[in-house]
Amino acid sequence: MEKYDALILGSGMGGLATGLLLVHKGKKVAILEKNSRPGGRFTSFERDGFMLDLGVHIISRGKNGPATTCLESTGLESPIDWMVIRPVQSTGGKIFKFPRDLEGMVPDEDLKAVIQFVTDVKGLSEEEIMALNDITLEEYLNRYTTNNIVHSCVSRVGDVYLVCPEWVASAGEFARCLQWEANAKSSAYPAGGCVSVANAYADGFKHFGGELYLDTEIAKVIVEDGKAVGVTGVDGKEWRADMIVSNADIKHTVLDLVGEEHFDKEYVDYVNGLEYSLCSPVVRIGLDTVLDSDIKMLGQFYAPSQHEYYEMLAREEIPEELNVFLVSPSNFDPATAPEGKQLVMLASPVEFMNDEFAEKYIEKMIDTAEGYIPGLREHAIFIDKSLPSQIAANVGEGGAVIGVAQKPGQVGSGRPKIKTPLDGLFLVGGEVEGSGVGVELVVGTAMKFVENYVD
């Protein structure tokens, strides 16, 4: 039986980054992926000449963030071409830039308050940010203003960063993400779709001798004498290694793949109590013509009250105006659509929905988008939909966009640790210690794991 220095479970960006860094250090590594393509949430697929992302993404720091620096730390030249872009916001058909374009939409005192809020957040020290870890974004913003439109705007920015509403999201994590993005000034989208980043990492991993096995689902982590020593595939094949690094859902890893009998009750209770970020239905629309060449990334929101919005959804009522992240990748990356055609993608962070209600909600998402790009349905070559249940089946975690929510009690010292209580078992990805927006958080955990636990 072949023995490895490390086995990585899952080829999401956390797994790919971990694998790349390990093989660069000369380790013998295999990545085992249950799906037929690498990248996890951060991948793309082709349909009718369009390149469709699994999710709807913007990378907070683009070329100046971890997704680039991690790759280049191995001596590889990054092949990723970053298309710099800044989202705008909208409500009631009005498109504007946050926060200064709120003038005339809110009273002057609230405009001054939110501008002061953003200014103060940008100037916070790391110590001051840490002090905000365990209060919510809503609580912190209330110190400046309680205006509903302002709160909806900020909550929607928080949705992009943390995929949690303002009364759930950690103020400290929000502040850290806003600071990093503001300083980098390089929020961007990878040319060719998210798969271009996943492929760059997978190619680098294989370049240094790593072994990537797709369509390889794991049934169990092998534990001997209190140490994780290998895994068994659903096909019965056994793999052995000195380290098992899981890029999978922490609950699935601990409770199913390993088994709670190998952990003390306190840790099992802690894992069971972890809460995930919101999930999202996703809609991808290929158009037979370019209906609108101006809209790039638009954060549409329901203005009256975000609390009211989510309460309506909990009752399975659909608001008149939805929170929708509307992106047209082909307007800034022509490679994502055939010439003369347009790609439109929609996402909307929500609590998990049953399929019947999600189908109705998706139709309203398209209605909302048609308010900005009339003719979507008429000119659609295809409308590709992903229900939360489908995303959950693919990536786990109830379809959560990021993983363990960045909320009070689950950030800083309260976040799951990379090193688990079981000897030989480590975690990377959107579940564990670190900060940042989406894929940047995920890649950062890989860098932290290799720095702290690998000789």
Image: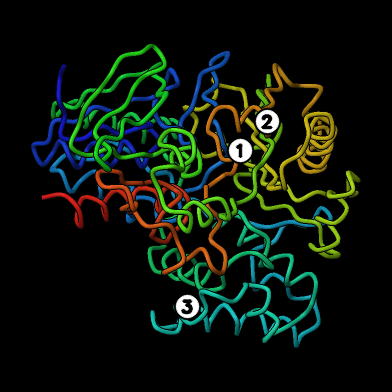
The residue depicted at 40 percent of the width and 36 percent of the height is 258
Percent coordinates x, y for residue 227 in the rendering: 25, 41
- Asked whether 448 or 74 is in front, the reply is 448
Q: Please tell me whether residue 194 is drawn above or below residue 426 in the rendered image.
A: above
Q: Quadrant of residue 6?
A: top left
Q: Is residue 388 left or right of residue 76?
A: right
- What is the three-letter code of the residue carrying label 2? Ser
Q: Nearer the viewer, residue 202 or 111?
A: 202
> 266 or 417: which is nearer to us?
266
Q: Residue at x 62, y 39 (%)?
A: 398
Q: Going from the N terminus, do you reach mark 2 or mark 3 first? A: 3
Q: Quadrant of residue 374?
A: top right
- Mark 3 and mark 1: span between their CA atoms? 32 Å
Asked if the residue at tag 1 contacts the one at tag 2, i.e. Cβ–Cβ closer than 8 Å, the answer is yes
Label 1 belongs to which residue? 399
**Place of residue 80 in the rendered image (x, y in percent of width and height, measured from the top left):** 32, 38
Judge depth for marks 2 and 3 and give the one in front.
2
- Location of mark 3 (residue): 122
* For the residues bearing labels 3 and 1, Cβ distance under 8 angstroms: no
Instruction: Say the numbered circle drawn on residue 389.
Output: 2
Crowd rating for badge 3 (residues with CA inside 10 Å; few <14, some 14–19, many 20+) = some
> Which of labels 3 and 1 is toward the front?
1
Residue type (three-letter) at the residue carrying disc 1: Gly
- Name the foreground residue: 56 vs 9: 9
Residue 399 falls in image quadrant = top right
User: From the image, which quarter does the N terminus lie in?
Assistant: top left
Give x and y (percent) for residue 44: 48, 27
Dot placed on the residue nearer the N-terminal end, 2 or 1: 2
